[in-house]
Image (cartoon, grey):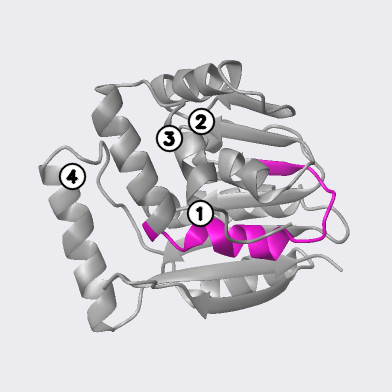
Amino acid sequence: MKAHVSSQSLWRIARLCTIRSQRWERCYTIMKLRSDPVYAAVAEALAGSSLPVLDIGCGIGLLAFYLREAGYKADISGFDYDPKKIACAQSMVARSDYRGLSFVTGDARQGLPECSGHVVILDILQFFTPQEQSALLGAAASRVAPGGRLIIRTCLRDDSRRFRITVAGDWLAKLTFWMKASPVCYPDRALFESVLGAAGLRVRLQPLWGGTPFNNHLIVAERE
């Protein structure tokens, strides 16, 4: 499996989008897939595996489609609280030749779909309270199979300038209605080391800034 996919593959995904204005949504999708380093980072973390994937907070399913274009063949399930995004993801699957992709609506605070494989959580932890974060991480860790990984991208709470810029950017996004919800609590490094370590996972954290000023990090927790 390749971590980076071709422009032709990215446009193949973008052409499936039909929510809002088709032209605007397709342009946004191609820009997001090209500029955000998280898709290639997840593909690289999953390289060589044949385990299924559960994507918590999947949105319209861009990660699943990217992984298919990168050559990942195992089943991928997406889970998100926004029924409009799930409906879009389902319609994109229906218009494609991708197989083994499924998307369902649900609230992660109320429980997660059953899975034994890899679990991915991208950019949603800041919308949960500390107690909810711990519960979600514990539930996600319990669905990681032997040899599987829990892969997370999040902003880490620290005293850096990047963190302050991230907070300001998130609040601006909320004020301009780009984001529906306000940030509640940004996790810190200790949360992942304590909760995931206690769940028997080996935890590794690394910056994943890309070309942005934000304090994003990639957390990969593996069950041996």
Front of the two marks 1 and 3: 3
Front of the two marks 1 and 4: 4
Q: Which residue is mark 2?
A: 107
Image position, residue 2 (x, y; %): 68, 59
Q: Which residue is mark 3?
A: 14
Under circle 2, the secondary element is: loop
Q: Residue at x 65, y 50 (%)?
A: 70
- Mark 4: few, some, or many residues within 10 Å (few <14, many ≥20)? some
Query: Which of disc 3 and disc 4 is earlier in sequence?
Result: 3
Q: Which residue is mark 1?
A: 133
Q: Residue furthest bottom?
A: 160
Q: From the viewer's perspective, is 6 left or right of 149?
A: left
Q: Which residue is mark 4?
A: 174
The circle drawn on residue 96 is: none
Residue 204 sits above or below residue 43 on the image: below
Q: Residue at x 52, y 22 (%)?
A: 92
Query: Which of disc 1 and disc 2 is earlier in sequence?
Result: 2
Say whether marks 4 and 3 touch (CB < 8 Å).
no
Query: Which of disc 2 and disc 4 is earlier in sequence?
Result: 2
Distance from disc 4 to disc 2, alpha carbons, whole Å, reads 20 Å
Q: Which residues are magenta?
A: 35-54
- Using the image as rendered, state which of residue 10 and residue 61 is in the foreground: 10
Amino acid carrying label 3: it is Ala
Say whether marks 2 and 1 touch (CB < 8 Å).
no
Front of the two marks 4 and 2: 4
Q: From the viewer's perspective, is 18 left or right of 58?
A: left
**Residue 85 visible to the viewer:** yes
Q: From the viewer's perspective, is 145 left or right of 44?
A: right
Front of the two marks 2 and 3: 3
Amino acid carrying label 4: it is Lys
Q: Quadrant of the N terminus?
A: bottom right
